[in-house]
Image: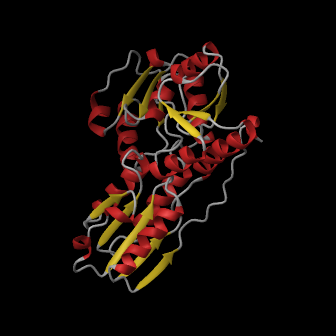
Amino acid sequence: MKVLLCRPRGFCAGVERAIETVERALVKFGRPVYVRHEIVHNKVVVLDLVAKGAIFVDDLAQVPAGSHVIFSAHGVAPEVFSQANQYHLHAIDATCPLVTKVHVEAKRFAAKGYTILLIGHADHVEVEGVVGEAPEQTLVVATAEQAEVVQVPNPQMVAVLTQTTLSVDEAMRVMNVLKRRFPALATPRKEDICYATTNRQMAVKSLRGKVDLWLVIGDRMSSNSNRLRELGADSGVPAHLVLGAAEILPQWLEGKAAVGITSGASTPESSVRAVVDRLRELGATSVEEVDGIPETVEFSLPREVR
């Protein structure tokens, strides 16, 4: 059995920025530093930061006045910044710049009076944050079927935005329906789905027909990790999403000649290495890195922790 290891995989620039923001805040301001919501959707990362002194909360009312609180890479609605001021907290925004771009577009379209159709999953925190920019003017559309029936006040004043971590193929299906139904549809100046999501999906597609099992390493809360698992399954072979090596069942590997491995954009490389080691224990005879699109993107840190 051979293992084909996708590249790129794992941490994207936005995730690296968010994690480093928490680590630097702990050094600069001391323990504890509070984080609203999981800084990224990966329990391994979260537990590591907890051990270093971070405290994760879902409600800013849980944070003592005067404390530093970091907003996660997924972004927050404007009302969350207002709450932080109300509670006398020192807010540090670790939102991925590519998510911030979607927020800026939402504000721009809303100011012009557009109804905004946001392609994404309504229960995802990133979508909740974007909707918060213009809740009265934003409708979330998750599927092509929903796109066929969504109603807007003025079909000549409709704009579309996209959650950054969607399946590229599924988002395109939804987009095509919206463009057909609303010929005047206003679109973003630049693609919303982030480069890392796209690159990781392309890497999985490049191995279509070359593996007979997919292991995607990521958290079940991670949108982009779930999309990678779905993409692997779409190629007609079993595909499993695992947080780490302990979740691999030996029977998955029975009769398999080639196993493809990738990891979500919030998955640490240590989890990947542990999975590879476990596969070697279970009979893997070779591990091959498969090159994809090189990634050189870097984002500057929030000014509070530079």
Nearest the viewer among 197 and 84 is 84
Q: Is residue 138 left or right of residue 145?
A: right
Query: Most extreme residue toward the top, as rendered?
Result: 86
Foreground of the two, 69 or 200 = 69
Which of 291 and 114 lies nearest the eye of the viewer? 291
Q: Residue 191: name its quadrant.
A: top right
Going by the image, does 186 lie left or right of 254? right
Residue at 63% across / 35% down in the picture? 33
The picture quadrant where one finds residue 173 is top left
49 lies above or below 4 = above
Q: Is residue 9 above or below residue 119?
A: below
Q: Position of residue 125 (x, y in %)?
A: 45, 33
Residue lying at 62% horizontally and 37% vertically, measured from the top left: 94
x then y, percent, for residue 97: 63, 40
Q: Residue at x 66, y 47 (%)?
A: 20
**Position of residue 65 measured from the top left corner of the image (x, y, whole percent):** 63, 19
Percent across and percent down for residue 280 are 39, 80
Residue 159, relative to residue 86: is it above or below? below
Q: Residue at x 42, y 55 (%)?
A: 218
Considering depth in this image, is 302 or 237 the residue closer to the camera? 302
On screen, residue 129 above or below 38: above
